[in-house]
Image (cartoon, rainbow, N blue to C red):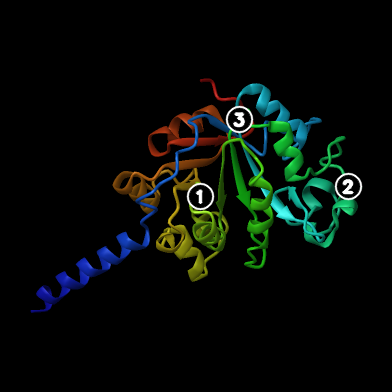
Amino acid sequence: MRYKKRIPATLAAAGAYLYAISPRLSHRPERMPRVYYAHRGLHDNLSNAPENTLAAFQKAVEGGYGIELDVQLTRDGRVVVVHDYNLKRICRVDREVDSLTWEELQQYTVYQSDQHIPLLSEVLKLVDGRVPLIVELKVKNAQSRICERTQEILNHYEGTYCIESFHPRALVWYRNHYPSICRGQLSMNFQREDKNRQPVFYVMRHLLVNFLTRPDFIAYDCRAMRAFSKNLCRSLYGCPAVAWTVKCQAQLDACRPFYDYFIFEGFVPKD
């Protein structure tokens, strides 16, 4: 009797898990072009084209590579292209991006180059639809304002783009307000790489909120090639997997069987 009772419980758990990780299954938007995507532009932080700058994006365009970039808000609500919330690493000043106005931000340069943190609108004007974009939304304090302000700008852009975020709130916002836009869930093995052992990071690692966000692709740490939920989404539901961030040709070759798209940095893919 105990064995018979266990079977329905196991089937129910399996069914709940498959439902939880399921991506969008109908009315999917057109997939992104199958090109290599330059992480934060085709950058070199020791050169005059450091990450997330107009110079790095220009180099990516000239090379024919798609671009992955990050957006967040300044204190006065301007959408800027920068990864870190704090400027200590890239500008050597201990200030939060959202504590500064756009004008105040312009007094700092990126990695001691002549490049400044650009506005998203400046980047879109430079790219002008010539290569596809992956726009990562940096959601701070679980606020959706970054989604609203970013999409107000993207609404006037005629090039190809998609959005992605680690924070499910961003994807839920797009699901509710702009369902036609391709959206991706970022994830990784938080426990191994960042030592984050809170339950929420376990849930995120295993994509257990996909039933809320219904992503069109999964962007996963390329080192976690055999991540079970990511691979199951790909094989069972046909959900594309995007590898980030590939840092050499050997790593690219190793992760090819487990991913469909590749975001690279620090080298130029051979093919």
Crowding at label 2, few (<14), some or many (≥20) Cα neighbours within 10 Å? Answer: few
Q: Could you say where residue 270 lies in the image, as x and y percent from the top left? A: 54, 20
Dot 1 falls on a residue whose secondary structure is strand
Amino acid carrying label 1: it is: Arg
Which residue of the protein is positioned furthest toward the left in this rendering?
Answer: 1
Total of numbered circles in the picture? 3
Q: Can residue 183 be seen in this view?
A: yes
Pick whichever of labels 2 and 1 is earlier in the sequence. 2
Q: Residue at x 92, y 47 (%)?
A: 107
**Looking at the picture, does residue 68 appear above or below residue 11?**
above
Estimate the spatial distance between the alpha carbons at disc 3 and disc 1, rounded to whole Å.
18 Å
Estimate the spatial distance between the alpha carbons at disc 3 and disc 2, rounded to whole Å.
27 Å
Q: Could you say where residue 261 lies in the image, as x and y percent from the top left? A: 48, 36
Q: Residue at x 61, y 49 (%)?
A: 136
Pick whichever of labels 3 and 1 is earlier in the sequence. 3
Q: Is residue 43 visible?
A: no
Kindly identify which residue carries mark 2.
106
Pick whichever of labels 3 and 2 is earlier in the sequence. 2
Q: Which of 14 and 179 is in front in this view?
A: 179
| Label of residue 131 in the image | 3
Crowding at label 3, few (<14), some or many (≥20) Cα neighbours within 10 Å? Answer: many
Image depth: mark 2 or mark 1 in front? 1
